[in-house]
Amino acid sequence: MSDSIQSISGHIVILGWSRRVERIVRELRNDVHRLAGEMRPILIITEQSLSQTKTDFERVYFLHGRYNDMEVLRRANLDTAHSLLIPTTIPEADAADGQSVFSLLAALSVNPSLRVCVEVARAESSDTLSYIRRKGVTEGDVEIVSFESFAERILAQTAVNRGVSRVYDHLLSFGTDSNEVYMLPLPANWHGKTFRALFQHCFEREVIVIGFERAGQLCLNPKNRDTLLAPDDAIWFIAYDKAAGIACIGK
């Protein structure tokens, strides 16, 4: 194992290497992250031979080993990682989701407070992972992405709202000429103030506040614009980059 991997911290760990993962890495190496100074190291754990995993992306490292091998996960410095991505890496949906569950449990055994984003192929599998999360297996933040559910909902939306898929595509693509969705913890200077006041303040500065999150519940475009913002709230907004939101809202 190289010295770069042994000393790595604050990094993003990704399980598996494929064309899909390469596209994920390309998004994470977009100019938006470069200009914002958010080029976190990326460590990819792969079961392939390291000779098959060459890439031109900067600060991207590879570690050979099995995804649910706790010793391999320890060598990936999960205890100091920023986050872990578990994408679907094999075509058989049921087998892929089973592997994702085992990989998640192994990772949480190494670092129970780890921030994890896990992809599942079947919508039913997200229920299994939600059950694991509710049972307190993790102290961290486990986010579940079901592309089956996403695809179904976008298709349904597109059927009645022509062009809506382009809006989602725009918001989900990092680019210097596109807007993205970001989240920030509510700064102290906004505690006790209304959502209306925050919305108007940001709108005049090219940042669109779309809602807030409180105690795990998301409230988008709240009907009561005079809702008072609380210290533990998180603010969701649309902007050209996260720095614009920080400059507008504070931190």
Image (tube, helix red, strand yellow):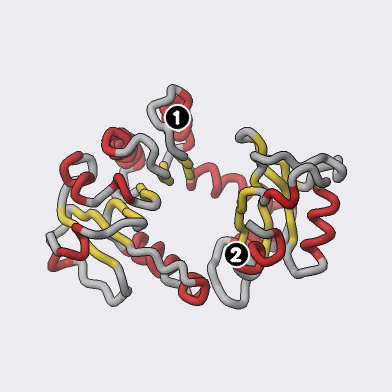
Amino acid found under the numbered disc labelled 1: Arg
Residue count near mark 2 (Cα–Cα under 10 Å), binned few <14, some 14–19, many ≥20: many
Q: What residue is drawn where x is 62% and y is 72%? A: 178
Indicate the quadrant containing the C terminus: top left, top right, bottom left or bottom right: bottom right
Q: How far apart are marks 1 and 2 (CA)?
A: 28 Å
Q: Position of residue 219 (x, y in %)?
A: 72, 41
Q: Earlier in the sequence, mark 1 or mark 2?
A: 1
| Residue at the disc numbered 2 | 242
Residue occupying the far top of the picture: 135
State the image coordinates of residue 6 (x, y, percent, origin top left). 19, 58
Seen from the viewer's position, the closer of residues 79 and 42 is 79
Q: Where is residue 25 in the image (x, y as percent from the top left)?
A: 38, 65
Q: Residue furthest front?
A: 189
Are circles 1 and 2 on residues that touch, CB within 8 Å? no
* Circle 1: element type: helix
The image shows residue 223, relative to residue 155, as above or below, that is: above
Q: Name the residue under label 1.
A: 133
Across the whole image, how many numbered discs are drawn on residues?
Answer: 2
Q: Does residue 245 appear to the left or right of 76 in the view shown?
A: right
Q: Position of residue 236 (x, y in %)?
A: 66, 52
The quarter of the picture where the N terminus appears is bottom left
- The picture quadrant where one finds residue 166 is bottom right
Question: Which residue is at 81% across, 61% downward?
Answer: 201
Q: Nearer the viewer, mark 1 or mark 2?
A: 2
Circle 1 packing at 10 Å, graded few (<14), some (14-19), many (20+), is: some
| Relative to 55, 31 lies left or right | right
**The residue under label 2 is which amino acid type?**
Lys
Q: Is residue 38 left or right of residue 238?
A: left
Of residues 162 and 25, which is closer to you in this image? 25
Position above or below: 57 against 187: below
Q: What is the secondary structure assignment of the residue under circle 2?
A: helix
- The residue under the point 74% across, 56% down is 209
